[in-house]
Image (cartoon, rainbow, N blue to C red):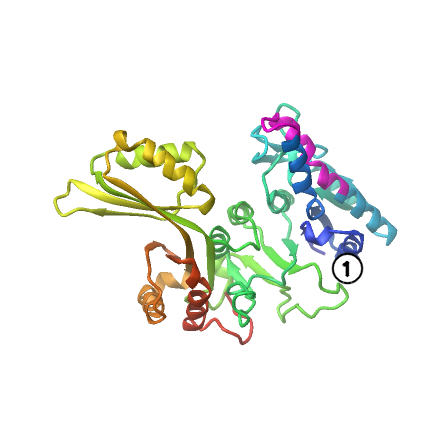
Amino acid sequence: MARIVMKFGGTSVGDIERINNVAAHVKEEYDAGNEVAVVVSAMSGETNRLVSLCRDISAFHDAREYDVVVSAGEQVSVGLLAMALNKIDVPARSWLGWQFPILTSSVHGSARIQDIVTDALEAQFADGRVAVIAGFQGLSQENRITTLGRGGSDTSAVAVAAALNADRCDIYTDVEGVYTTDPRLVPDARRLKKISYEEMLEMASLGSKVLQTRSVELAMAHKVKLQVRSSFDDPAKKKDVSEDGIAGTMVCSEEEIMEQEIVSGIAYSKDEAKITLRRVADHPGTAAAIFGPLADAAINVDMIVQNISADGGYTDMTFTVPNDDLARAHQLIESMRENIGFSEVESTSGLAKISIVGVGMRSHAGVAQKMFTELADKSINIQVISTSEIKISVLVDADYTELGVRALHAAFNLDGGNEGAG
C-alpha cells in the first residue's frame, strides 16, 4: 500500500466527461489499496472568467475579496469530483483550503504556504476515504481565504504530499510526460523516463509549461517524487508504464538516475526583448540604480551582460525583459538617464531565448562550443549568452527559434529512439 497525492489541472476537469475520467483514474489507485488524496484545479477557463469579473467590477478591487471570488472555481471542481467518486463506489469527501486548514501568508493573490494541518486527512485515510482537495487556495492568519497565484494547484499538491510524507505526487496534465523539447516544434522529441529536480526547475523557469516553477522548488526542498502523467489515457490500460513501474516522467533526485545525458532537454521562450544602455558610468551602485527601480515596477529582468570599456570608465549594459514589459522598461530607464548617467538606450523586441539543460554538463567540457558552432552553421546570430552550472541560454531573433531548437535537438542526439534516462 502506498500513500499517493494525485493532482488534476483545469483541462483534466474541463467538463463532466473528463471529471468522470478523473474519477476512474482515482478509482484505479484506490482499488489497488493505496491511500489517496486528490488535488484539483478549477475547470478550464473558469479562473479567467472569475478574474475578469473582478476587473469588471473595479480595476482597484480589494485583493482579499478578489481571492474569495477566484477561489470559487476550485470549490465547484472538488464537489463535482467527490460526487463522481461516490457514484462509482469510491467513498470521498471534498475539502476546501480553509477546512484543513492550509495555512498561508497574507499576500493575497500570491500567498505562500506556511503549514498544513493534516489531522483531517489522516482521519480520512483511517476511514478508508479519498480526500478531494481544492488546490490554489488556503487560509491566512487573519482567517481570510487566500490564493497562491496562477498555477498554484501544482504547489498545493506538492505541499500536501510533503505534509503527508506521501510516496509520490502524480501530476496529471494534457501531455504524457516531460519531453526533450516541445513535441509541437520537434516531432521527434522523446519522453524522458526520469529527470532531476534541478533540470526540471531550469526547464520550468525557461519556458517549459509542464510544471509550475514553485511546485518543483518545493518538491526539491522536501524530496517529493513527482510523476508527470496524462489524464487522457484510458485508466484501464497500462501502456505508458515502463518496466520499472514509472508512468510518464518521474522527477526525482539526481542520485536516482543511473545514466545522465550531457543535455537532457531544450527549452525556449519567444517572449523576449532586449535593452542596451550605452556608455554607462562605471562606478559602485550603478547596477543597483538601474535594476532596483525595474524590480519596484515588477519588471522581471533575466539575462544580463556588462562590457567594460578599454579605459575602464564606462560600460555597456545589456539585459532582457518580457516583450510585454519592454515599453514600460524603456520609459522607466529613460526617466533615470540623468541619475544613472548613460549616453543612449536601445531596445529590441521580437527575440527568443533558447536554452540547453542537463546535469551532465557539470562534468563534460565543450558543450558550449558545440552549441555555438551548431547555431553558427545555421547562420543564427547569438545576441546574448547566459550560463549556469547546468544550463546555457542564448538570445536570438525569434524567427530562428524553430530552426535553432531543431538543430540543437539533433546535435545533442535527443531525437527519436526510446525514452531517455534523464
Residue 65 falls within the magenta-colored stretch: yes
> Disc 1 on helix, strand or loop?
helix
Amino acid identity at mark 1 = Glu
Q: Residue furthest bottom?
A: 417
What span is in magenta? 57-76
**In this picture, is 171 found above or below 414?**
above
**Rendered residue at 77%/41% (across/down):** 76
Residue 271 in the image: above or below residue 56: below
Q: Which residue was labeled with disc 1?
A: 28
Is residue 102 shown to the viewer in this render? Answer: no
Residue 155: percent from left, percent from top: 59, 44
Q: Is residue 394 left or right of residue 89?
A: left
Q: Position of residue 12 (x, y in %)?
A: 71, 54
In this view, the residue in front, 193 or 128, is: 193
- Residue in the image at 80% along x and 52% along y: 16
> Percent from the top left, x then y, of residue 53?
68, 34
The prevailing secondary structure element of the residues shown in magenta is: helix
Q: Quadrant of residue 88?
A: bottom right
Q: Callout 1 environment at 10 Å: few (<14), some (14 to 19), or many (20+)?
A: some
Residue 380 lies, with reference to residue 291, above or below; the image says below
* The N terminus lies in quadrant: bottom right
Apparent side of residue 331 relative to residue 157 in the rendered image (left or right)? left
Is 360 within the magenta?
no
The foreground one among 2 and 286 is 286
Furthest residue toward top: 142
Is any atom of residue 201 visible in this view? yes
Q: Position of residue 9 (x, y in %)?
A: 67, 50
